[in-house]
Amino acid sequence: VDGYIITKNISLNQNITPNGLLFEVVNPKDVWAKIYIDEKISGKVKIGKKAKIKLYSNNKTYKGRVVRIMPKVDLVTNEKEVNIAFNKLPTPFYIGAQVDAKILVKTYKDIYKIPLNVVSFYNKKQGIWVKQNNKAHFIPIKMKIKNDKFVKIDNINLEIIVPNPKKKPLSEGSKVL
């Protein structure tokens, strides 16, 4: 086997038995990041999906892919084990290093990522203000994806207005400079 010795189980002048384990050797091609994902989203994760693996030791991110999904769910945490292989193994690598990983499960096309603070309410609807003919117009939106800083919405080919929270709210037809 061509690989790295990670454990030495013998010492000088020690008797060796025929079935004794002398060394543990790891094949660098088989070094995977082991992560746990919530059972609720595990159906979206498939073998071969692209992933990004961030190592805590050097704070670098590496490309990878999902190579194994364990079928058994932990009954206490409701999580599944997922193994992610590195596309290119980091050097040096450390067995047992802590990682964080993101798995790409879905790709959206023709959407915009906008700051969440651009989204406002008008006439009990959630939407954004856009500039049309130098006037403000409110367009209701449906959010595709949302986190605490950004929202992704359908493609809008108009200039988006960022309302100033310190000034009076915009109204339909307001003149925009």
Image (tube, grey):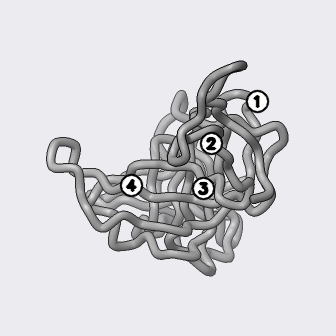
Q: Nearer the viewer, residue 166 or 85?
A: 85
Labels 4 and 1 touching (C-beta < 8 A): no
Q: Residue furthest top?
A: 12
Asked where in the image residue 107 lies, by quadrant, the reply is bottom right
Helix, strand or loop at mark 4? strand
**Which of 70 and 171 lies nearest the eye of the viewer?**
70
4 or 2: tag closer to the N-terminus: 2
Q: Is residue 133 toward the left or the right of residue 48 in the image?
A: right
* Identity, as a three-letter code, of the amino acid under mark 3: Ile
Q: Going 69% across and 65% down the picture, which residue do you hit?
A: 159
The reply to whether residue 68 is in sight is yes
Of pointers 4 and 1, the one earlier in the residue sequence: 1
Q: CA distance from mark 1 to mark 2?
A: 25 Å
User: Residue 58 shows which numbered tag?
Assistant: 1
Number of other residues with Cα within 10 Å of mark 2, as a class: few under 14, some 14 to 19, many 20 or more:
few
Which residue is depicted at the point 65% across and 59% down? 30
Tell me the kind of residue under disc 4: Glu
Are the residues tagged 3 and 2 within 8 Å (C-beta)?
Answer: no
Above or below — where is 134 with respect to 59? below
Q: Is residue 177 positioned above or below 135 on the image?
A: above
* Classed neighbour count for the residue bearing mark 1: other residues with Cα under 10 Å, few (<14), some (14–19), many (≥20): few
Tell which residue pokes out farthest to the left in this image.
Answer: 75
Image quadrant containing the N terminus = bottom right
At x 56%, y 54%, the residue is 102
Q: Amino acid at mark 1?
A: Asn
Q: Amino acid at mark 2?
A: Glu
Residue 139, which numbered label?
Answer: none
Residue named by callout 2: 24
* Circle 2: element type: strand
Q: Residues within 10 Å of mark 4 (few under 14, many from 20)?
A: some
Disc sitting over residue 81 in the figure: 4
Separation of residues labelled 4 and 2 (CA atoms): 23 Å
